[in-house]
Image (spheres, rainbow, N blue to C red):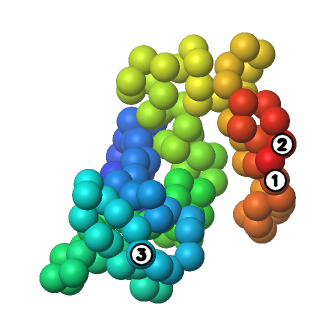
């Protein structure tokens, strides 16, 4: 991961295959009509097959920072670069008047202070 971010930091896009259980407590969930059991954040089908991720994007950004990726690069790879890759950079991916205001405010230690969705604090 560090090598790719070093070689092409402006081309990296953070994505997630997270399922509906992302950010939720352990328990029973559904994925495509199949029962999924989440224990300690790991989502599996009845036969033990991994069913998808329960990691949210904020956790993924913090993981990249722990891996040694510069904060600014991790945020860019999770916001503007993905928006640009799907042609939505005029609507989302950065803070600018007229864009959707989906924002996380964090403290200096990357603890979540509050969340805004469409400009409304939740």
Q: In this view, does 40 lie to the left or right of 24?
A: left
Q: Name the residue under label 2.
A: 121
Can residue 18 be seen by looking at this rendering? yes
Q: How crowded is mark 3: few (under 14 residues within 10 Å), some or many (20 or more)?
A: few
Q: Which of marks 1 and 3 is nearer the N terminus?
A: 3
> Residue 11, which numbered label?
none
Dot 3 lies on which element? strand
Disc 2 vs disc 1: Cβ atoms closer than 8 Å?
A: yes
Q: Quadrant of the N terminus?
A: bottom left
Q: Mark 3 points at which residue?
A: 28
- Give the quarter of the image for residue 101: top right
Q: Mark 1 points at which residue?
A: 114
Q: Which residue is drawn at 50% across and 80% down?
A: 26
Q: In this view, does 23 lie to the left or right of 12?
A: right
Q: Which of marks 2 and 3 is nearer the N terminus?
A: 3
Closer mark to the observer between disc 2 and disc 1: 2
Q: Which of 111 and 29 is in front in this view?
A: 29
Can residue 64 be seen by looking at this rendering? no
């Amino acid at each position: 991961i560090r090598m790719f971010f070093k070689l092409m930091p402006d081309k990296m896009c953070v994505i997630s295959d997270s399922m509906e259980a992302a950010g939720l407590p352990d328990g029973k969930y559904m994925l495509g009509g199949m029962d999924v059991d989440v224990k300690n954040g790991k989502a599996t089908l009845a036969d033990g097959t991994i069913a998808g991720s329960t990691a949210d994007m904020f956790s993924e950004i913090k993981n990249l920072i722990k891996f040694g990726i510069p904060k600014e690069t991790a945020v860019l790879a999770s916001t503007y670069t993905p928006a640009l890759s799907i042609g939505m950079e005029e609507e989302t991916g950065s803070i600018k008047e007229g864009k959707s205001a989906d924002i996380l405010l964090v403290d200096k230690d990357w603890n979540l202070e509050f969340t805004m969705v469409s400009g409304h604090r939740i």
